[in-house]
Structure formats: structure tokens, C-alpha cells
């Protein structure tokens, strides 16, 4: 099973790299597969590569679903 996550670009790096944020976790990723990514854009991240840009509203919905899953996991513990 593969998992791709929406992440927000917070900094553009050297070459085709960027720093992204997901819930306070920051990671350097590759933007080699995309054109014209800007700070503030949301991208779909899979194994270190941004696969596509994502609408901010869709990103917010998806992140809210992940947060709800995390909360239900904590409640079940």
C-alpha cells in the first residue's frame, strides 16, 4: 500500500528542492516532477517527491481527515 500526503511548501531550496511542513514536521523534498511551485502551495508528497499540486481547500479537507483519524486512534488507546 502506498501513501501520499498533502504538504505545504514553506521554503524553496537549491535546484528542484523545497522544505515542506506537515503538522510541524519539516522535510526537504524534490520538486523535480513539477513546474512552478511557490511558497504556500500544497503538493502531494510520496517517497520524497512532490507528485502534483493540490487545491488549498482539498488539502485542508484531507489534513482534517488525517487529524480525525489520529484523534480516534488516541481515544481508542
Image (spheres, helix red, strand yellow):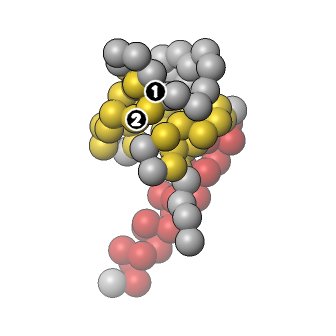
User: Badge 1 local density, few (<14 within 10 Å), some, or many (20+)?
Assistant: many
Picture residue at 42% right of the left edge, 76% below the top: 73
User: Badge 2 local density, few (<14 within 10 Å), some, or many (20+)?
Assistant: many
Q: Earlier in the sequence, mark 1 or mark 2?
A: 1
- Is 75 situated above or below 25? below
Q: Quadrant of residue 28?
A: top left
Picture residue at 44% right of the left edge, 32% below the top: 30
- Is 11 situated above or below 31? above
Q: In the picture provided, is 41 more to the left or to the right than 19?
A: right
Q: Nearer the viewer, residue 6 or 69?
A: 6
- Is 22 situated above or below 36? below
* Residue under pointer 2: 29
Q: Determine whether the residue tagged by mark 2 lies in a helix, strand or loop.
A: strand
Query: Where is the C terminus found, in terms of image quarters?
Result: bottom left
Picture residue at 55% right of the left edge, 64% below the top: 2
Q: Nearer the viewer, residue 64 or 12?
A: 12
Q: Position of residue 56 (x, y in %)?
A: 63, 32
Q: Position of residue 24 (x, y in %)?
A: 31, 41
Q: Nearer the viewer, mark 1 or mark 2?
A: 2
Picture residue at 61% right of the left edge, 15% below the top: 36
* Residue under pointer 1: 9
From this viewpoint, is residue 56 visible?
A: no
List the single residue furthest toward the bottom.
Answer: 77
Q: Position of residue 15 (x, y in %)?
A: 40, 16
Amino acid at each position: 500500500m502506498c501513501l501520499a500526503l498533502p504538504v505545504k511548501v514553506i521554503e524553496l531550496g537549491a535546484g528542484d528542492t523545497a522544505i515542506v511542513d506537515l503538522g510541524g514536521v519539516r522535510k526537504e523534498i524534490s520538486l523535480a516532477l513539477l513546474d512552478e511551485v511557490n511558497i504556500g502551495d500544497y503538493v502531494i508528497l510520496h517517497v520524497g517527491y512532490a507528485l502534483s499540486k493540490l487545491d488549498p481547500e482539498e488539502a485542508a479537507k484531507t489534513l482534517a481527515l488525517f487529524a480525525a483519524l489520529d484523534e480516534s486512534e488516541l481515544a481508542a488507546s
